[in-house]
Every structure is written in structure tokens, then in C-alpha cells.
Amino acid sequence: MATKDAIIIVKKKSHAKHGHHGGAWKVAYADFVTAMMSFFLVMWIVGQNQDVRKGIAGYFRDPAAFSGGKGVLPGARQGTTGEQFEAAPNVESTKVKDAEALMQQAAEHLREALKSLPSFEKMKDRIEIRVTPDGLLIELLDGQREGFFDSGSAVPRPETVELLKVMGHELAQLGHHVVVDGHTDAQPYSSANPYGNWELSADRANAARRVLQTAGLGSELLESVRGFADTKLRVPDRPLDASNRRISILVRRESSEKLLTRR
């Protein structure tokens, strides 16, 4: 029996679609390879001798040594010398510490130099050397029975001259600016005498300055020479105390700029 219309069946083959994985695996793989390379590099460095390790450390501290660049590690210096380096400290705090250390070293060196003087033993209790915020302060203090100058005189005693010569030599080596001040107690001169404590303090400071200069302290290092009479008493509640009569020599700290220039 014939059919009027043929039935046509069409079969379409569909291709299965897989999910899109993206490139995330590539990133993970790259990290893994990088980690492995770093591991083998570290293991290789550990196995080298000390000179090689120092050289590598020097390179990373200053890879641009030939162009004056700085490395990525603290304590970098010019050139890949492989020296032992320390962590780079704070610049300002380093300058302050350097200035303090220099003053302390100068104080100790001066004390040792003064011990060579034959008269030091009888004067040592009247010589004060200390580091202050302004610098190294040296004070020559009169005693109740003896002083560095005769009473009312601006002529230094022979032992005072020897003392100041040693100081002048040492301070010249240090190369800092120096301030020389003269002070008296509050004992007034006779009203009939036109010469008073102002003149005496200034003349004593100048006398000390002359001796310091004969020992080598250059005029370019002298900042000032001043006389204060009894306006800056060391013992304000005892204006007639002998220690108010004194010569003060201040060795200035260097400025931050000058310290940085010397480094």
C-alpha cells in the first residue's frame, strides 16, 4: 500500500561542550616555577664559599655601583666590594651620636694629656671637663687658697700657662670653634679704682686666649673672648664663693652640615 507522503527523519549530531577553564592554571604554574628557581638559587648560594657570598651580597646592596646608584638592601656602599655591611642607621641620629662620641673622646684625650703635667695633682680638683649640649666645657676654678691667677691680677701663674698650653695644643688638633669666657666673684673693687670686675674678667679671658694661641690654636677657631664679671655666678647663692672666679673654655659641637661634610 503506497503512502502519500514520505516521512523524512533528520538526525543532527551534537558535539558535547566542555566548561571553559581559563588561564588560571598558567599563573599558578608560573608561581611554582618561580618558587623553584628561587629555592635552587638560594641552595646554590649557600653552597658557595664566603668570598662568593660576600660578592653577591655586595651586588644586591649596590647593583648600580658603576653609575653611583644605591642597592635595595640597607647599608649599601659604593661598589660591589663584598665588605661586611651594617644596617643603614637614621642619618640625623647618627650625626648626633657621632658628635657626642667625638666630644667624649676629646674630653678623655684631654684628661690624659693634662696628667702629664707636674702640677696636675694639685690642680686636678679645680679643673672640670664635661660634655654639655653646647659642646665640651672646660672650667678652671679658683680655690679658697689658690687660683690660676694672682688675686686681682690678669697675669696667669706659671702652672696655669703650662696647663693652657697643653689645652691649646689639644684643641687645635680637634679643630672646633672655641669660646673663652672670664668670670669673677661678686667682691667689688675699691670705688676709687676705675679697674673693676668687668675689666678683670675680660683681661683674664684674653690672657688665657693668648696662651692657647701660642700653643697652636688658630685665630680662625676662636669664636669669641668675653668677660662677664659676676653676672653669671657659678654658685648664685654664694656670690663670694671662690669657684665663681673661673675661666670657661667651650669647644663647640660641629653643626650637622659640617659633620655630614666630614663623613
Image (cartoon, rainbow, N blue to C red):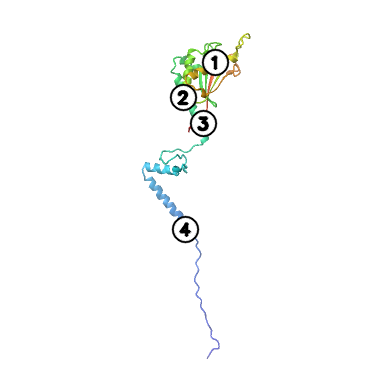
Q: Could you say which quadrant of the image residue 224 lies in?
A: top right
Do the CB atoms of the residues marked 3 and 2 lie less than 8 Å apart? no
Residue nearer the viewer, 253 or 100: 253
**Could you say where residue 21 lies in the image, as x and y percent from the top left?**
50, 62
Which amino acid type is shown beneath numbered disc 1?
Arg
Q: Is mark 3 on a helix, strand or loop?
A: helix
Q: Which residue is drawn at 44% across and 52% down?
A: 34
Q: Farthest residue toward the front?
A: 219
For marks 3 and 4, the one nearer the N-term is 4
Determine the CA span between mark 1 and mark 4: 87 Å
Which amino acid type is shown beneath numbered disc 4?
Lys
Q: Can residue 185 be seen in this view?
A: no
Q: Residue 204 carries which label?
A: 1
**Could you say where residue 209 lies in the image, as x and y percent from the top left?**
52, 18
Determine the CA span between mark 1 and mark 3: 31 Å
Q: Which of marks 2 and 4 is in front?
A: 2
Residue highlighted by disc 3: 258
For marks 2 and 1, the one nearer the N-term is 2
Q: Which mark is residue 173?
A: 2
Determine the CA span between mark 2 and mark 1: 24 Å
For marks 1 and 3, the one nearer the N-term is 1
Residue highlighted by disc 4: 26
24 shown above or below 154: below
Q: Can residue 173 be seen in this view?
A: yes
